[in-house]
Image: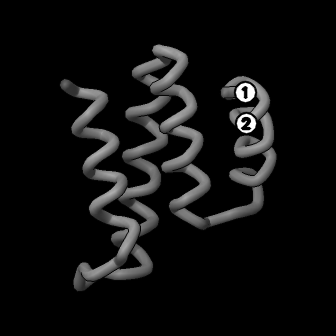
């Protein structure tokens, strides 16, 4: 429930990480706080990173990012 603190920590990680989970999780935090534009931006970054590391698909993180982004749009 400490989403602001989590955003701070994920932001520090995002500076030196290309892990899509960092951006996906930070996007979730933004979403919980109602900061939808920031959440969408992070989900998009996560999807771009997933595409780079798994251009043929099959990345296990991919469904979670699409699911969370879909929930945000609903």
Mark number, residue 2: 1
Q: Which residue is drawn at 23% across and 85% down?
A: 56
**Residue at image point 38% right, 33% down:** 40
Residue assigned mark 2: 6
Q: Residue at x 45, y 50 (%)?
A: 45
In the figure, 25 relative to 48: above or below?
A: above
Where's residue 44, x and y in %? 38, 46
Residue 37, percent from left and from top: 42, 22
Label 2 or label 1, whichever lies nearer to me, is 1
State whether residue 50 is above or below residue 73: below
Q: Are marks 2 and 1 in contact (CB under 8 Å)?
A: yes
Quadrant position of the C terminus in the picture: top left
Residue 70, picture quadrant = top left
At horizontal 46% and vertical 26% (from top left) the residue drawn is: 31
Nearer the observer, 29 or 19: 29
Q: In the picture shown, does residue 43 fall above or below 18?
A: above
Answer with left or right where residue 26 lies relative to residue 60: right
Q: Quadrant of the N terminus?
A: top right
Q: Which of 48 and 4 is in front in this view?
A: 4
Position in image of residue 15 (x %, y %): 75, 52
Left or right: where does residue 23 sit relative to residue 63?
Answer: right
């Amino acid at each position: 429930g400490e989403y602001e603190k989590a955003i701070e920590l994920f932001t520090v990680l995002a500076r030196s990480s290309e892990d899509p989970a960092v951006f996906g999780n930070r996007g979730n935090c933004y979403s919980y706080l109602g900061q939808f534009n920031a959440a969408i931006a992070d989900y998009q970054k996560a999807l771009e990173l997933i595409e780079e590391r798994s251009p043929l698909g099959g990345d296990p993180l991919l469904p979670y990012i699409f699911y969370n982004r879909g929930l945000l749009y609903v």
